[in-house]
Amino acid sequence: MYQSDRGNYKTNEPIAKAFMNSCLGKLMIFVAFILVMLLIAYLTTPTEKEMKAEMEDNIMQCLEENDSIKGDAIDDFVHNMGFIFTNADSTNVEEDVRKAYHMYNRLEVYRHAFYATAYLHNNLHPGGVRVGFGFLGLIVPTVLYEDILLDVGPVHKGYEQKLYRQTIIPDNDMGKTPNIQEYHYKRNPDD
């Protein structure tokens, strides 16, 4: 086969454009973008003090706003979405509820490299349950009312108490046993 043009196949593209169009160039740009985003996430991670103050505020709002079915996750989710961008001017949580919260619950904040998490520890969740996380300067509550312990009492009356009560059914005469024939559960052959 004869090739008429035996010239150089170089293009007149600038080196920057050639680098941008290459696979290595696209990979380097992607890695640089990820590194910049990680740096921004690291610098804007909420501090423990900010996280604790905001989560205490969110938990008090959750205790105050809980006026419908206890443990309704939909209400908690809607309230949590509203709590992201708001701070309570004042919360009207009853004093005994506030004391019970502080007595039976402990809030711990953990700061990681690029985000922070808040966990609520109590007898229901000895290992803690996550009630919020913060990243990019934003604190997102995930508080559920059912995770907050406000009352502690005995589970049963004592160790000698039986867990179930044996019921004694009185021996009543229920009447005559019906004559069950095959056509009661199969079709009647006369039909």
Image (spheres, rainbow, N blue to C red):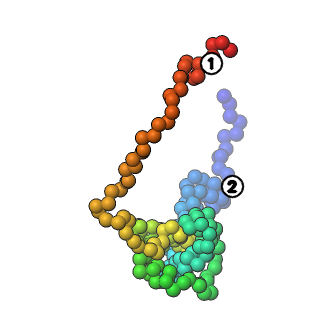
Quarter of the image where the C terminus is located: top right
Q: Position of residue 181 (x, y in %)?
A: 55, 19
Residue 7 or 48: which is nearer the viewer?
A: 48
Seen from this angle, which residue lies furthest left?
A: 160
Disc with the residue nearer the chain's start (2 vs 1): 2
- Label annotation for residue 12: 2
Looking at the image, which residue is at 59% across and 85% down? 92
Q: Position of residue 94 (x, y in %)?
A: 54, 84
Is residue 87 depicted above or below 146 in this figure?
below
> Can residue 58 be seen in this snapshot?
no
> Can residue 65 be seen in this snapshot?
yes
Looking at the image, which residue is at 37% across and 69% down? 154
Q: Which residue is mark 1?
A: 187
Element marked by disc 2: loop
Closer to us: mark 2 or mark 1? Answer: 1
Q: Position of residue 101 (x, y in %)?
A: 46, 79
Looking at the image, which residue is at 60% across and 53% down? 22
Residue 54 or 115: which is nearer the viewer?
A: 54
Please tell me how crowded label 1 is: few (under 14), some (14-19), or many (20+) other residues with Cα within 10 Å.
few
Which kind of residue does numbered mark 1 sit on? Arg
Residue 107 or 2: which is nearer the viewer?
A: 107
Q: Marks 2/1: CA distance?
A: 90 Å
Element marked by disc 1: loop
Please tell me how crowded label 2 is: few (under 14), some (14-19), or many (20+) other residues with Cα within 10 Å.
few
Looking at the image, which residue is at 40% across and 49% down? 167
